[in-house]
Image: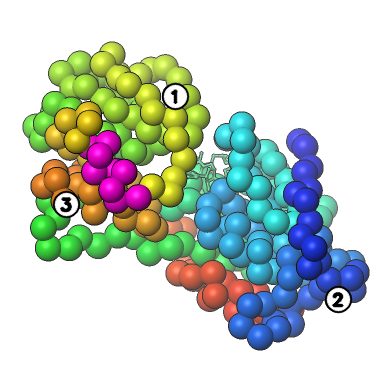
Amino acid sequence: MPNLTAPEPDSVPESGAVGLSLSGSGGVSPGRVAAGSPRLLVLGGTTEGRALAARVPVISSLAGRTSRPLLPPGEVRIGGFGGVDGLVRYLRAERIDAVVDATHPFAATMSGHAAAATSQAGVPLLVLRRPGWTSQPGDVWHRVPDLPAAAALVPALGERVFLTTGRQSIAAFAALDECWFLSRSVEQPTDPMPRRLEVLLDRGPFTVDAEIALLRQHRIDVLVTKDSGGTTAKLDAARARGLPVVMVNRPPLPAGVPTAATVDEAVSWLAQRG
Ligand code: NAP
């Protein structure tokens, strides 16, 4: 499992100066976790995980799903831990003092493993999750519990479908021969895939105007998205075009784990552990 260290910013404090005492409103500078400082693990792969690593010295962990990951500042490790037992071993071997699960709201397996492993190892855990989206006047949203339910609903809403659920979700739509799909993802999807499919390799953020142009260019009838939260350009564009949206609800969070909705809240939680 490779251990990467991203280029460190100019403002890295000298060894020993890094800790969790916050300076002003911005927190301490990021960098390597200094000897003697609390050792904090951030399970990342999200904007929030990168933002947290820019505020506090942490070890960021990425799954290694993308070939060109957006690396957070500071220390980064890449690759799975090997299930709950592997994560327990990692927490003990690396003497981790606290964990922030800042994974994507749909990374439910990792979140479950983090809850089980931190409980076994006696390490405090915080889940950092940006809020989900809420509909506005003019929205035509159909909330569904999961991807199979989304696939079951889509043909009734339109033929030309914009899929923004990520490449790992595309298999759920593979059997829908009656629909044509535009699928947008960071990496090329793999089989099984729908027969009538155009793949758009792209990474956000996107503007509302560009999203409206894309919907118009491909004569899209229906948008499918996970309730990921964050920037709303595709939802604004669908509303502007009067298109229905199939919104896949989030999987439940692990029970009994404290949560934070913002990076500020996570920084405060970590500061209490410094
Ligand atoms: P997942 O299904 O919940 O996790 C599957 C396995 O991948 C985990 O058991 C773990 O392997 C490994 N893993 C996941 N996140 C990891 C992390 N941050 N560090 C180390 N190992 C990790 O995860 P996923 O939905 O495939 O997401 C993978 C990554 O992509 C996450 O970091 C997530 O934040 C990011 N992401 C996901 C989505 C999405 O829609 N799901 C969207 C954007 C970004 P082991 O069991 O071997 O430890």
User: Where is mark 3, residue-wise?
Assistant: 239
Badge 2 local density, few (<14 within 10 Å), some, or many (20+)?
some
On screen, residue 178 above or below 114: above
Residue at 70 percent across and 56 percent down: it is: 73
Seen as rendered, the residue at the extreme bottom is: 24
Residue 178 numbered tag: none
Q: Is residue 121 visible?
A: no
Badge 3 local density, few (<14 within 10 Å), some, or many (20+)?
many
On screen, residue 224 above or below 192: below
Q: Nearer the viewer, residue 138 or 76?
A: 138
Asked if labels 1 and 2 touch by Cβ distance under 8 angstroms, the answer is: no
Residue type at tag 2: Ala
Q: Nearer the viewer, residue 138 or 263?
A: 138
Q: Is residue 81 visible?
A: yes
Compare marks 1 and 3 and give the one earlier in the sequence. Answer: 1
The magenta stretch spans which residues? 207-215
